[in-house]
Image: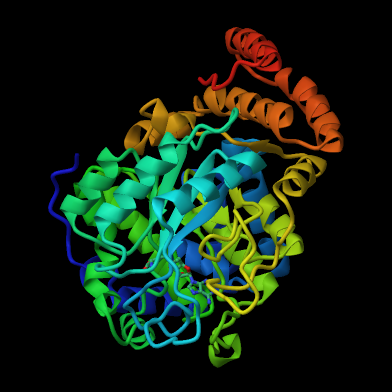
Amino acid sequence: MYDVKSPRAEEFIDHQEVLDSLAYADANKNNAALLDRILEKARLRQGLTHREASVLLACEDEARNQEVYRLAEQIKKDFYGNRIVIFAPLYLSNYCVNGCVYCPYHISNRHITRKKLTQEDIRREVIALQDMGHKRLAIESGEDPRMNPLEYILESIKTIYSIKHKNGAIRRVNVNIAATTVENYRRLKDAGIGTYILFQETYHKESYEKLHPTGPKHDYAYHTEAMDRAMQGGIDDVGLGVLFGLEFYRYDFAALLMHAEHLEAVFGVGPHTISVPRIKPADDIDVNAFDNGVSDDLFAKVVACIRVAVPYTGMIISTRESQQVRERVLKLGISQVSGASRTSVGGYAEAEPEGENSEQFDLSDRRSLDEVVRWLMQLGYIPSFCTACYREGRTGDRFMSLCKSGQIQNCCHPNSLMTLKEYLMDYASPETRVIGEELIRREIQNVSSERVRAIAEKNLQEIEKGSRDFRF
Ligand code: SAM
């Protein structure tokens, strides 16, 4: 538990410092000597400051930009190997009292179908997710203290963890719900959640207030300080993100890194993950109404610069993005992807009836989990269903120090192979299974510790015979 007093939002996201960083980046975007010094520092793989990373993001020199991409790829390989962790979002309720102008759940949307899952509905959803092979979920909910109080979220988490269908189990529940109190974060921690995720949407206070004109989310400081309260409540794995397209991307990029620096400075541990959602068309949302759209090329550069700036932080890409875009950014730093997602409430167990629409946004990647797993393997990645770290108490600074020393590889690599093996045995199509078995045969030879390799090989045989849930 972190008993630390945090500075206020406007201190750690100092608007003037963001503007000065952008001006500095503009002034130096062609400064060859400075760019080379920053690249030299990046090669040490210990990260960059928000200012340094902002210069790289603004850089106009083609050869040096290529070097940023090359470095991002290398850092990704060094810290995450070729593993990609897979998860799915589970929408519990789209009742919401906020007025977010980019989100169709906003309170004045009268034609979206409002739904809230009962515990029985959740059971059906979780069984459908388990039957695909998912082990890790991120629960999502609109903010409505009356319809979706914390008690409802806690009860839902309990239900999710309790369901064991065939060989299925949800072993890690991450939570993406509205900013709340230290006490509520403590209760979420006690419920056994993995990461607490909350997107800032934008760090630009004036824009933030316009984009969130009504409801509790309007309070910029309360929202921006949420991660401090989460940490004070004992949650040491927190996930940051901005919704690209709302504000000037370079502003939010610099501020996002300032937020990470702040958490590291105050709590001794930076964010566990960073998500990079881009705004998508949705029920009554026209993306053309937002004039800060980020092109695919800029998006790739943002991902690469985040990877270089915070090497130890996982990066998440959702099915908001197409297969093509996902493929591009996987190389540049992404370590987690969602697969076979539904953003409607209750969309896994059955398709929405004609005339109903509870979706949060349109999806670009609608492939099945089997297709996503096969695609990853064909690209040379190991799809991982691993959830071991937080179950073994490797969270917060414990996780970070293992990550920084490189020791985490001895857990993650064999765990990815064992969880992939479980997936192949229980859920994969014959075609995916053939590719996966061959990958495991090859990859097990690359487990660096002989002792760990021997145990993992034995565990793989046990999985073949029907045992489950081995982990390092
Ligand atoms: N209600 C919670 C809150 O207030 O932060 C979070 C849950 S919400 C279901 C998850 C995220 O979806 C939001 O934080 C937002 O960034 C994203 N989102 C909302 N509308 C979107 C859109 N039109 N396109 C893409 N992402 C969107």
Who is closer to the viewer here, 138 or 115?
115
User: Horizontal and vertical percent for residue 356?
Assistant: 58, 76
Q: Is residue 17 left or right of residue 415?
A: left
Say which of 83 and 60 sits in front.
Answer: 83
Examine the rendered structure and indicate whether residue 194 appears above or below residue 117: above
**Does residue 113 show up?**
yes
Residue 129's x, y, as percent?
Answer: 59, 46
Residue 335 seen in render: no
Residue 404 located left or right of residue 11: right
Number of on-image labels: 0
- Give me the residue at 44% from left, 86% from top: 109
Quadrant including the N terminus: top left
> Compared to 465, does 167 lie above or below?
below
**Which colour style is shown?**
rainbow
- Write the residue at 32% across / 73% down: 17
Residue at the image point whose x is 43% and y is 29% from the top: 402
- Residue 95 place in picture, x, y as percent: 38, 72
Return the x and y of residue 433 as percentages of the image width and height: 81, 31
Task: Residue at 53%, 88% (x, y): give it.
Answer: 290
Residue closer to the observer: 114 or 154:
114
- Horizontal side, residue 242 vs residue 278: left or right: left
- Vertical arrangement, residue 50 with respect to residue 171, above or below: below
Residue occupying the far bottom of the picture: 289
Write down the quadrant of residue 292 in the picture. bottom right
- Where on the picture, by quarter, is residue 251? bottom left
